[in-house]
Amino acid sequence: MSFRTRLALVAAVAVALAVVVASVVVFVVVRNQLRGQVDATLRARATQIRNGPPLRVEDGYLEIPGGPLGSATFEQAVTANGHVYPTRGEHGSLPVTHDTIEATHEVGEEHLSDTHIAAGDIRVLTISGNGIAIQIGRNLSELDHTLHRITVYLLLIALGGILVAAALGLAVARAALAPVRRLTETAENVTETGDLSQRIEVGSHDELGRLAASFNTMLAALEESSRAQRQLVADASHELRTPLTSLRTNIEVLAGDRALRPGDREKLLGDVVEQLGEMTSLIAELIELARAEQTHEEPEDVRLDLLTESAVERARRNRPNVVFKTELGESLVHGVPSTIERAVANLLDNAAKWSPPGGEVEVGVRDGEVTVRDHGAGIAEEDLPYVFDRFYRASSARGLPGSGLGLAIVKQVAEAHGGTVTAEPAAGGGTLMRLRLNGRVLGSS
């Protein structure tokens, strides 16, 4: 059974219960109203008898002023010994019970009861007084017939209500579950085709609309993850092809039978070690790039000046032939500390790589911005727009170690934090890099 059918069935059952309960309530109310009218008629007749002339018995019949109320009414007198005096023209009499005999010993009391005779169900009002009991009965056949018709009508209304509820339940379930159906179809289509670019149209802001929006967000995240994986594979295969080819050639030469001079063998071994180091560095950069795209660390408030100071200390240890000068103003940014520190470290490493031996690298922090300026040869104007692209290496950098991913990681971190990174020629030579993050200067308050 489908969920839509179950939902429609539940709606139909709920409406059915409501209709049944309402029908029962209506039946009880109408029944009590009709019986109340009968009881009022009997009491009015009793009042008429009390206020009229004294009752008398002639020829064994009870003479009541005004005569009987009609063919549906029974009136009789019962004595203390159980003798019955009916009115003239009645066919049959009301049964005498122990309560009727007891009523002959009371004064001014009234008792309502139900009984049954050959003519049908009777509603009986018993009046006590002066050693006799006067019984006034009203045939309930007409009332029972009316209640029967009302019962039939209520059953038909209830059945119709249930059918209408089932039909409306199906229609409502179909309309309400339309977003779920679209979501299911999209999920099945994605499963069959593997196309993660599909999306569900969100037409409302209710729970189903939020579910569709969440599903779209999940698809977007999966698509981005898949894109990052494909990019990583493409980048790795492209960049590893050249060093692997060169490494294989050198190893084949070393493993061959051809005699090599000691100097050539040492040179080949040095090339192998250098190529392995480049490959290790490249793989590490690729992993770092992919990890940054998939990071799930929660951002937090970060002291950019303290983080930069820590990165500078490591750079000083790794690059002892470069002098790092700092001017770090207190600055607070909101982000992931590890990725920000990685970006700053890459800027420092890039500046040190381009600095001459004993050269200076000036590092500054102010208002959520890190500036790194080197005094190297600078970047050619035609290369400036591309220095943050993946694997881009200027012609002047082809002979230097590096993978071409360091500045791409800086750009990725900057964009992930809603910031920017730029490169520009510095006055007096060299290059000035600016890493701008959303931050603020710490106040004294």
Image (tube, grey):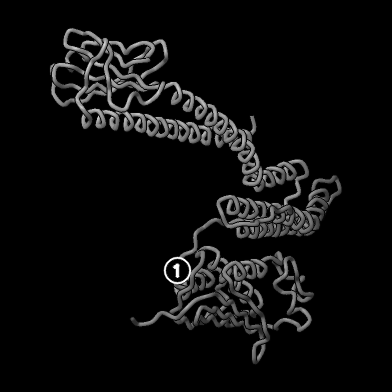
Q: Residues within 10 Å of mark 1 (few under 14, many from 20)?
A: few
Residue 262 appears anywhere in the view: no
Give whichever of 391, 70 is nearer the camera. 70
Residue 272: x, y in percent?
74, 55
Q: Is residue 389 above or below residue 11?
A: below
Q: Residue 72: x percent and y percent?
A: 40, 22
Q: What number of labels is visible?
A: 1
Q: Is residue 251 left or right of residue 320?
A: right
Depth check: give the residue in front, 395 or 179.
179
Q: Residue furthest front?
A: 59
What residue appears at the point 80 percent right and 58 percent down from the top-left corner? Answer: 242
Question: In front: 234, or 269?
Answer: 234
Q: Which residue is mark 1?
A: 301
Q: Amino acid at mark 1?
A: Asp
Answer whether residue 305 is visible to the viewer in this image.
yes
* Relative vertical location of residue 320 with respect to residue 184 in this rendering, above or below: below
Q: Quadrant of the C terminus?
A: bottom left
In the image, is residue 131 above or below residue 433?
A: above
- Residue visible at 37% across and 13% down in the picture: 116
SS type, badge 1? strand
Quarter where residue 128 is shown: top left
Q: Residue at x 64, y 37 (%)?
A: 167
Residue 137 image offset from top left, x and y in percent? 33, 21
- Residue 221 in the image: state x and y as whole percent: 64, 54
Residue 87 position by quadrant? top left
Which quarter of the figure is the N terminus placed in? top right
Where 277 falls versus 22 (above or below)?
Answer: below
- Could you say which is closer to the camera, residue 443 or residue 408? 443
**Farthest residue, direction bottom:** 428
